[in-house]
Image (spheres, grey):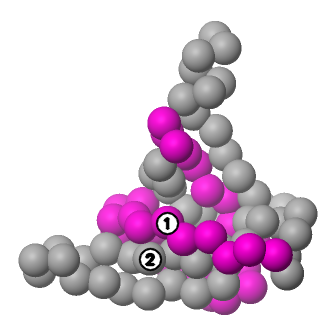
Amino acid sequence: MILAMKLKRTRQAILRRVQPISIHGQISWDVYFSDSDDPNGTVHTARVGPEAMEGGLEPDDPIKLEYLMGAVTSVRRSKG
């Protein structure tokens, strides 16, 4: 159980920007975000595929990031 908690986690954040990027013709998204606890702090970046990104997200939206083994696997609108 403890190992599973270290491998999988979630993080609340504020979306700052989304930048599409094409690598060898495959589209991915660079997601720029700040921690919800420190919205004026460091801006972090994660690269995800289109299947991992919820549509319709705008800058300053609250988001929930899901991680697996330290890599972002899902970006969704936070419910609160």
Q: Which residues are magenta?
A: 41-70
**Label 2 CA crowd tier, 10 Å (few <14, some 14–19, many 20+):** some
**Label 1 CA crowd tier, 10 Å (few <14, some 14–19, many 20+):** some
Question: Foreground: 38 or 63?
Answer: 38
- The quarter of the picture where residue 75 lies is bottom right
- The quarter of the picture where residue 12 lies is bottom right
Q: Is residue 78 above or below residue 8?
A: below
Q: Residue furthest top?
A: 1
Distance of mark 1 from mark 2, alpha carbons? Answer: 6 Å
Q: Is residue 1 left or right of residue 55?
A: right
Task: Determine which of the numbered discs, if any, sits on residue 38 in the image.
Answer: none
* Rendered residue at 52%/43% (across/down): 70
Q: Residue furthest front?
A: 42
Residue 79 location, x and y as percent?
A: 77, 61
Q: Residue furthest left?
A: 24
Mark 1 or mark 2: name the one nearer the start of the chain.
2
- As for residue 28 lying within the magenta part, the answer is no
Labelled pair 1, 2 in contact (Cβ < 8 Å): yes
Q: Amino acid at mark 2?
A: Asp
Q: Is residue 25 left or right of residue 72?
A: left
- As for residue 68 lying within the magenta part, the answer is yes
Q: In this figure, which residue is indicated by the disc labeled 1? A: 46
Question: Foreground: 69 or 53?
Answer: 69
Residue 23 location, x and y as percent?
A: 18, 77
Q: Is residue 6 above or below residue 57?
A: above
- The quarter of the picture where residue 65 lies is bottom right
Q: Is residue 43 left or right of residue 23?
A: right
Residue 32 location, x and y as percent?
A: 58, 78
Q: Amino acid at mark 1?
A: Ala
Q: In this figure, which residue is indicated by the disc labeled 2? A: 30
* Rendered residue at 71%/52% (across/down): 11
